[in-house]
Image (cartoon, rainbow, N blue to C red):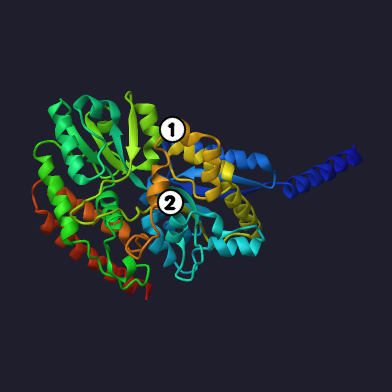
Amino acid sequence: MKHSTLGSIVAGVALSFASTAFAQVEIQWWHAMGGTNGERVDKIAADFNATQSDYKIVPVYKGNYTETMTGAIAAFRAKEHPTIVQVFEVGTATMMAAKGAIYPVEQLMADTGEPFDKGDFLPAVISYYQTPDGELLSMPFNSSTPVLWYNKDALDAAGAEVPTTWAEVKDASQKLVDNGMKCGFSFGWQSWVMIENFSAWHNIPMGTKENGFAGFDTELVFNNDAVINRLADVADMGKDSLFVYGGRRGDSLPMFTGGECGMWLNSSAYYGSIKSQSEFNFGQTMLPLDTDVAEAQQNSIIGGATLWVLAGKSDEEYKGTAKFLNYLASPEVQAWWHQETGYVPITQAAYELSQEQGFYESNPGTDTAIKQLSLNEPTPASRGIRFGNFVQIRDIINEEMEAIWAGDKTAREAMDTAVERGNVLLRKFERAIQ
């Protein structure tokens, strides 16, 4: 009886050791994708987990972009951080300045021996997340750019053409309102669309030092005549409901999908939502050109987010992370993600696979974002932005723009104030990293 009991104990210990030896290494991935996109993130993780048995990616939704980034920073300080965190593009400078907190993706791939070629990625996407020396810091994941969405049925009924210039946006809006619509157009993520991308699209610097890429001692300069005149004209259109403001992020989406506004300027990544929510024929086209500012478009810049790897984890977790990031960037996964969401495919191979699958033929206009980003070789004014404390600066810009729409400030007063307040935060960031 004693011998039998001892045998059971030995067998149990052996089983415990075996379980430990074959236990999957869990890798936490904090992200900001809610709703349907959150379900798609879960699917990507589950599909990767099903390809092997050594690692388990555990996706955890942590709120919006700002909440996810600030939560990860707080968790790192408490040594309770995830291995992977999704950070939106305006958090890039903050993450770069977090010395010792990040594990550059390019270095991770080299250290783990995972095959990796930067040349596979679309230049307009990858350049945003590289050091001045070209090292890739984070893995591109969900990249988008703003486009002009339009209600085709409404434009046809009003006898309006799909606009290509801001003058045509105004004309089409007037016709839409005259035909009974509550508003001509609206937009979301207004700093990104109407200042950051408006500037890049017209090849105007938003800040000195190549928009911050050439040094954190940059200063904001978007209080120029081109931006001010455009915002003033939009505010003027608001007096007759040709323009109606609907919120800082994607709050105004229902105004478009519900048929109140005939046009909407916002991310290409709203494709899935618009397709599922709208009951009319819709399309997307390139951002309008302000012909008073430029004769031709330059290129738009990306939004969205990348995946950053945080320091302080085990070698085994990093091996699994590198394998997962390679899986995430594979043509099949990226083509699926692109076609489901409207985010651009981050690699040339994923773009070509989408072409081969006939996606763009079946869904005309869904390659608009890719064409915009690749329209011309990026210039120092159109590569993107890299400003410290830009999450907070965007809040300032939003406040000042809302003062314009409310009629409390002129466009010039608001932009001058936004630049002045924003430069204070740039200097604060510069002192902090020194």
**What amino acid is labelled 1 in the image?**
Asn
Residue 156 screen position, x and y as percent: 25, 27
Residue 312 screen position, x and y as percent: 56, 62
Please say if 41 is above or below 302.
above
Q: Nearer the viewer, residue 170 or 242?
A: 170
The picture quadrant where one finds residue 315 is: bottom right
The residue at 17%/33% (across/down) is: 183
Q: Which mark is residue 54?
A: none
Instruction: Say few, some or many: other residues with alpha carbon within 10 Å of mark 1 (under 14 / 14 to 19 / 20 or more).
Output: few
The residue at 43%/43% (across/down) is: 343
Mark 1, mark 2: which one is toward the viewer?
A: 1
Please say if 121 is above or below 367.
below
**What amino acid is labelled 2 in the image?**
Ala
Residue that mark 2 sits on? 305
Residue that mark 1 sits on? 363
Q: How many marks?
A: 2
Mark 2 element type: strand
Instruction: Say few, some or many: other residues with alpha carbon within 10 Å of mark 2 (under 14 / 14 to 19 / 20 or more).
Output: many
Looking at the image, which residue sits at the far bottom? 434
Mark 1 element type: loop
Q: Nearer the viewer, residue 410 or 51?
A: 410
Q: Is residue 405 visible?
A: no
Q: CA distance from mark 1 to mark 2?
A: 25 Å
Q: Are marks 1 and 2 in contact (CB under 8 Å)?
A: no
Residue 163 screen position, x and y as percent: 25, 39
Q: Is residue 104 visible?
A: yes
Q: Quadrant of the C terminus?
A: bottom left
The residue at 15%/30% (across/down) is: 177
The picture quadrant where one finds residue 119 is: bottom right
Q: Quadrant of the N terminus?
A: top right
Q: Earlier in the sequence, mark 1 or mark 2?
A: 2
